[in-house]
């Protein structure tokens, strides 16, 4: 039978006290301790750190190598305390910014609070919206709960205080060995060495039902500011870093609205040092179904069409490709679009193309890994990109690529062929002899009228 810690505690409480003997712990190399610590539960690591100085150091690496925060005074105070401890400061390698916010656009008083959640309750009462995070009854409960409204106001005030001025920039600075920043939103789940994203929509909070952080992640419309769209505020903040430590080489931006690149990105000192960059662009809005992972909804085809058009306009100005071009030390690039989406004709499309990522002929001098997901491209554009990177690229991953036709239809009125057409004099069997009038006439008719492509019967 396996002996658990509860068995040991019960046994120790029921047996007679015996003289304690000195316990000699056998020597294990630090490398072995590090392997052991990797398999320990995070809740056991604080006790593990009390065993010895070596265990304290190794346990700190496991507990604090990746830390997460969000925009609240409590979370920021925790980060400041870690930075103030010299030993803990050194072990922090990855910082996760939970970019879900409390604030709901245009909810400024109790009346707007009630109208907002009544509206959501009306939507969830319809059969086609089953799968929303809250049931109708829970949303009505929130709408009429004054305590929930007061709690919301207090949280929003605290959040605005943290977002004001250089407060968040100070949070991201000051770590001695910080190598990676992850900016995530949506449903997050705690895991060993940090957190991971588990869904695009935030998780249902514990009962009793209350407003939850990230409720307004995909709200949009004319009254929603650009910085309130997914990922735009964090993207704006990290552009203003006055100086970035050379250790920071990896940046991941999850679910950033395409509108972030509707304007030119002039600043961004950290681009000079980045060797790994991952970005996922989105046009998702609040009424997209969250249960199937797609942006397809016949009920909101008009809204989807507008978002696709706005995204195409944002990419057509080349601000995104100009931004990527400044990543001169890039070794790993991952660009994804949050899709697939379907147009009004029911066909799949993506507003992001390979041409929007890179200028024709441009090459990253050190790029070894490239992943593209849910993009549109022509064969020629994709081949051009790969040819420009052929001297350095070693790993290529393509997912959900939509191939566009490479050809354009000619509207010709007159065509004339004469002489011989061929690759070189040594390949005579591949030549077209247009000195033969019938062959020249058939090819000319094909280019004007269409039909079946003529067969070259010059050499039988």
Image: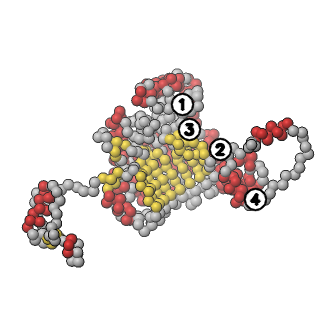
Describe the element under mark 1 as helix, strand or loop.
loop
Describe the element under mark 2 as helix, strand or loop.
helix
User: Which one is closest to the eye, mark 4 or mark 1?
Assistant: 4
Describe the element under mark 3 as helix, strand or loop.
helix
Q: Position of residue 327 (x, y in %)?
A: 46, 59
Q: Position of residue 440 (x, y in %)?
A: 11, 65
Q: Is residue 224 visible?
A: no
Q: CA distance from mark 2 to mark 4?
A: 33 Å
Q: Is residue 106 left or right of residue 449?
A: right
Q: Is residue 95 left or right of residue 216?
A: right
Q: Position of residue 272 (x, y in %)?
A: 50, 60
Describe the element under mark 4 as helix, strand or loop.
loop
Circle 3 packing at 10 Å, graded few (<14), some (14-19), many (20+), is some
Q: CA distance from mark 2 to mark 1?
A: 24 Å
User: In the displayed image of the protein, which residue is found farthest to the front?
Assistant: 1
Residue lying at 69% horizontally and 44% vertically, measured from the top left: 43
Residue position marked by numbered label 2 in the rendering = 78
User: Which one is closest to the eye, mark 1 or mark 3?
Assistant: 1
Task: Classify the position of the N terminus by image quarter.
Answer: top right
Instruction: Work out whether mark 2 precedes mark 1 in sequence or the reverse, and give the earlier one.
Output: 2
Residue position marked by numbered label 3 in the rendering = 159
Residue in front for this viewpoint, 107 or 454: 454
Task: Classify the position of the C terminus by image quarter.
Answer: bottom left
Residue position marked by numbered label 4 in the rendering = 28
Q: Is residue 44 left or right of residue 180?
A: right
User: Which one is closest to the eye, mark 2 or mark 1?
Assistant: 1
147 in relation to 195, above or below: above
Residue position marked by numbered label 1 in the rendering = 211
Instruction: Work out whether mark 2 precedes mark 3 in sequence or the reverse, and give the earlier one.
Output: 2
- Contact between labelled residues 1 and 2, with CB atoms less than 8 Å apart: no
Q: CA distance from mark 4 to mark 3?
A: 47 Å
């Amino acid at each position: 039978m396996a002996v658990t810690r509860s068995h040991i505690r019960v046994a120790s409480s029921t047996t007679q006290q015996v003289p304690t003997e000195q316990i000699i712990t056998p020597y294990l190399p630090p490398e072995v301790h590090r392997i052991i610590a990797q398999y320990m539960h995070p809740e056991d690591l604080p006790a593990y750190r009390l065993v010895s100085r070596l265990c304290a150091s190794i346990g700190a690496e496991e507990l604090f190598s990746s830390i997460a925060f969000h925009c609240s005074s409590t979370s920021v105070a925790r980060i400041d305390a870690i930075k103030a401890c010299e030993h803990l400061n050194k072990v922090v390698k990855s910082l996760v910014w939970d970019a879900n916010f409390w604030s709901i656009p245009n909810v400024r008083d109790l009346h707007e609070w009630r109208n907002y959640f009544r509206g959501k309750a009306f939507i969830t009462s319809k059969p086609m919206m089953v799968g929303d995070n809250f049931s109708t009854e829970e949303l009505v409960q929130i709408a009429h709960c004054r305590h929930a409204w007061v709690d919301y106001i207090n949280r929003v005030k605290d959040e605005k205080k943290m977002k004001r001025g250089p407060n968040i920039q100070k949070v991201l600075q000051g770590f001695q060995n910080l190598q990676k920043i992850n900016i995530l939103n949506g449903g997050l789940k705690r895991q060993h060495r940090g957190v991971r994203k588990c869904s695009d929509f935030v998780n249902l909070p514990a009962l009793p039902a209350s407003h939850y952080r990230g409720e307004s992640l995909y709200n949009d419309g004319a009254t929603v500011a650009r910085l309130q769209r997914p990922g735009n505020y964090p993207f704006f903040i990290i552009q203003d870093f006055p100086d970035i430590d050379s250790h920071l080489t990896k940046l991941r931006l999850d679910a950033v609205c395409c509108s972030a690149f509707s304007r030119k990105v002039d600043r961004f000192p950290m681009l000079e040092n980045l060797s790994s960059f991952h970005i996922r662009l989105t046009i998702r809005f609040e009424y997209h179904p969250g249960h199937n992972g797609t942006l397809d909804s016949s009920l909101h085809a008009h809204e989807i069409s507008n978002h696709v058009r706005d995204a195409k306009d944002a990419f057509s100005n080349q601000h995104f490709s100009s931004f990527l071009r400044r990543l001169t030390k890039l070794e790993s690039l991952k660009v994804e679009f949050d899709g697939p989406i379907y147009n009004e004709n029911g066909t799949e499309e993506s507003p992001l193309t390979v041409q929007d990522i890179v200028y024709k002929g441009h090459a990253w001098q050190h790029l070894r890994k490239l992943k593209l997901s849910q993009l549109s491209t022509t064969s020629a554009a994709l081949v051009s990109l790969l040819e420009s990177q052929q001297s350095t690229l070693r790993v290529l991953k393509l997912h959900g690529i939509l191939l566009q036709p490479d050809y354009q239809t000619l509207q010709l009125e007159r065509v004339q062929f004469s002489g011989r057409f061929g690759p070189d004099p040594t390949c005579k069997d591949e030549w077209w002899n247009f000195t033969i009038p019938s062959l020249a006439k058939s090819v000319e008719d094909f280019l004007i009228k269409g039909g079946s492509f003529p067969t070259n019967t010059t050499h039988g």
